Image: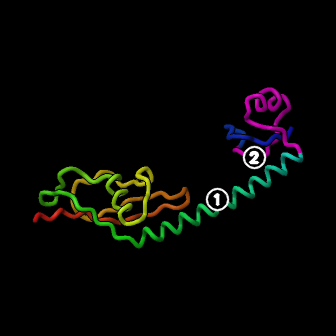
Amino acid sequence: MELILKQDVQNLGFKDDIVTVKAGYGRNYLIPQGFAQMATPSAKKVLAENLKQKAFKEQKIVNDAKATAEALKALEIKITAKAGGEKLFGSVTNIDIAEALEKAGQPIEKKYITSGIVKRTGKYSASIRLHREVIVDLPYEIVAEQEN
């Protein structure tokens, strides 16, 4: 029996795969649980069209992420923070980096930024995940706030 999986099934396949299983497993478990549907010729045509459209949309998203990555590489981020010598009063986190990027005209959500907590002045690097295929290393510098 041929089935089209509607979602990932462990030890069987991934979403949108066409799999062959025994009739009882398909009829009594996969189809009633909503994990699969019958692989009729019309369902196969619909699946092929959906996969084609999905690939086109995915390629556009990847291209947009790469363009954003190039724009981020051109930026020089300097974050000012209160410090006593080289040690900061407080720390610099992903939130501060996201705010600095927003001021620079590249709004990125803080959940996509990985840098850790920094408590000293100096040069550091943050990893920004724009897409599962596009990850950018963003160098930034933390400088002490100048007193007037």
In the rendered structure, the answer to whether residue 110 lies left or right of residue 118 reads right
In the rendered image, residue 20, in percent from the top left (x then y), is placed at 82, 41
Give the residues drawn in magenta, as a range: 14-40
Q: Which residue lies furthest to the top in this view?
A: 28
Badge 1 vs badge 2, beta-carbon distance below 8 Å: no
**For numbered disc 1, what is the local secondary structure?**
helix
Q: In which quarter of the image is residue 124?
A: bottom left
Q: Could you give the CA–CA distance between mark 1 and mark 2, rounded to whole angstroms?
A: 18 Å
- Mark found first going from the N terminus, 1 or 2: 2
Q: Which residue lies furthest to the bottom in this view?
A: 74
In the rendered structure, the answer to whether residue 23 lies left or right of residue 53 reads right
Return the mark for residue 17. 2
**Residue 30 colored in magenta in the image:** yes
Q: In which quarter of the image is the C terminus?
A: bottom left
- Residue lying at 84% horizontally and 45% vertically, measured from the top left: 43
Q: Which residue lies furthest to the right in this view?
A: 41
State the residue in front, 61 or 125: 61
Where does label 1 land, which residue? 58
In the rendered structure, the answer to whether residue 135 lies left or right of residue 97 reads right
In the rendered structure, the answer to whether residue 20 lies left or right of residue 133 reads right
Question: In this rendering, which labeled residue sits more in front, label 1 or label 2?
Answer: 1
> What amino acid is found at the position of numbered circle 1 in the picture?
Glu
**Residue 19 colored in magenta in the image:** yes
> What amino acid is found at the position of numbered circle 2 in the picture?
Asp
- Residue lying at 66% horizontally and 59% vertically, measured from the top left: 57
Figure label count: 2
In the rendered image, residue 56, in percent from the top left (x then y), is placed at 69, 61
